[in-house]
Image (cartoon, helix red, strand yellow):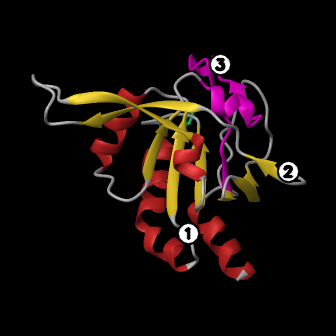
Amino acid sequence: MTGQKKVPFVTFLTRVRDDSVPGPNPYRWEERTSDDYFAGKRVLLFSLPGAFTPTCSTYQLPNFEDLYEEFKKEGIDAIYCLSVNDAFVMNAWGKSLGLQKVELIPDGSGEFTRKMGMLVAKDNLGFGMRSWRYAALVNNGVVEQWFEEEGFSDNCETDPYGVSSPQNVLQTLRAAA
Ligand code: BEZ
């Protein structure tokens, strides 16, 4: 990626806990925009093909969570994990991993991912349209560094993982410091 790219402005539909909601499922919808996530902050965004998938659940997301404090030392204000999954799925995924630090962004419609140019078909896996795996350092909404897995394509037979791993991103940030 070259030049100054801004993250697209979209509205995400999240589900947040609200104990004033009666019944056994005390959650309500809350709209959060790109500005809520990115304005005035230096953040790390990573995006992956799907909640609960093996590499994402075993390595990428838990490793970003484990290395969170190391990223903070590099001046990162927040780490976001985005996937083309709805808020119910993303919340269930975060709960299953005991996530405390990395924030999950549900891009259920794929609008953000499409506008980032990262939407790919994964019909070969029965997934429909999903995100290619990438990470980005985003400063006040502007992409400053870009970490995209090789081989961007529809119905890719492999799942490249390395460039956007937390270890590689952290090493790159440290080298640039
Ligand atoms: C994985 O994270 O391992 C994975 C991602 C997409 C499809 C299949 C597996």
Crowd class of label 2 (few under 14; some 14 to 19; many from 20; radius 10 Å): few
Q: Alpha carbon of mark 2 to alpha carbon of mark 1: how far?
A: 21 Å
Is ligand 1 closer than 8 angstroms to the Cβ of mark 1?
no
Q: Alpha carbon of mark 3 to alpha carbon of mark 2: how far?
A: 27 Å
The residue located at (59%, 59%) in the rendering is 44
Q: Magenta residues?
A: 110-136
The residue located at (76%, 25%) in the rendering is 154
Kindly identify which residue carries mark 1.
76
Left or right: residue 48 versus residue 29 is: right
Q: Which amino acid does label 2 sit on?
A: Met
Give the camera-side residue of 144 and 97: 144
Q: Is 124 included in the stretch rendered in magenta?
A: yes
Residue 9, how many percent across, how many down?
66, 36
CB-based contact (under 8 Å), mark 2 and mark 1: no
Kindly identify which residue carries mark 3.
124
Q: Which amino acid does label 1 sit on?
A: Ile
Q: In this view, does 96 lie above or below 169?
A: above
User: Residue 1 bears which disc, if any?
Assistant: 2
